[in-house]
Amino acid sequence: QVQLVESGGGLVQPGGSLRLSCAASGSIFSINAMRWYRQAPGKQRELVATIAKIGSTNYADSVKGRFTISRDNAKNTAYLQMNSLKPEDTARYYCNAFIVRPTLDISDYWGQGTQVTVSS
């Protein structure tokens, strides 16, 4: 059994910062790419940032220069540092990871999401 649990969401004023965490637990051999997605009401889920196991990163154009994705492989945890937040960043943020089980099966896992609201 594998679980991804996000935390760190909340209400923040425009221009503020939040740091999201995504902790993977359970029967894990290794974790490949980890990603953050977001979904606002009435909109499609959007890929925000990706980090490979070796640490290379990619970002959506809408968050480049403001968001930073990182990971701690020893803790099986990914982070999303969000600075200069805008009202349009308001969404539920989801963590996604490709996880290798001890059986060497690879599966795609999702967390339950954490709400980020940017409003004055």
Image (spheres, rainbow, N blue to C red):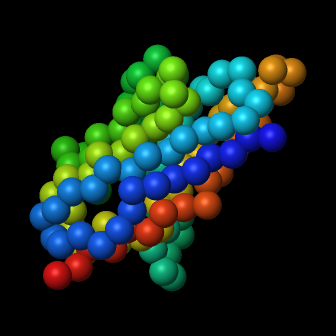
In the shown orientation, is residue 3 left or right of residue 61?
right
In the shown orientation, is residue 77 left or right of residue 105?
left
| Depth order, front residue of 82/40 | 82
Residue 70's x, y, as percent? 37, 33
| Depth order, front residue of 31/39 | 31
Residue 14, quarter of the rendered image: bottom left
Is residue 73 visible from the viewing direction of this image? yes
Residue sitting farthest toward the left: 15
The number of numbered badges drawn on the structure is 0
Is residue 47 visible from the viewing direction of this image? no
Rendered view: 31 above or below 91: above
Residue sitting farthest toward the right: 103
Residue 3, quarter of the rendered image: top right
Q: Residue drawn 62% across and 27% down?
A: 31
Where the C terminus falls, by quadrant?
bottom left
Rendered view: 96 above or below 73: below
Residue 105's x, y, as percent? 83, 27
Where the N terminus falls, by quadrant?
top right
Rendered view: 64 above or below 93: above
Residue 25's x, y, as percent? 66, 37
In the shown orientation, is residue 95 left or right of residue 120?
right
Residue sitting farthest toward the top: 54
Rendered view: 63 above or below 118: above
Q: Residue drawn 44% across and 26% down?
A: 72
Q: Residue drawn 46% across and 37% down?
A: 78
Q: Residue drawn 28% across and 56% down?
A: 18
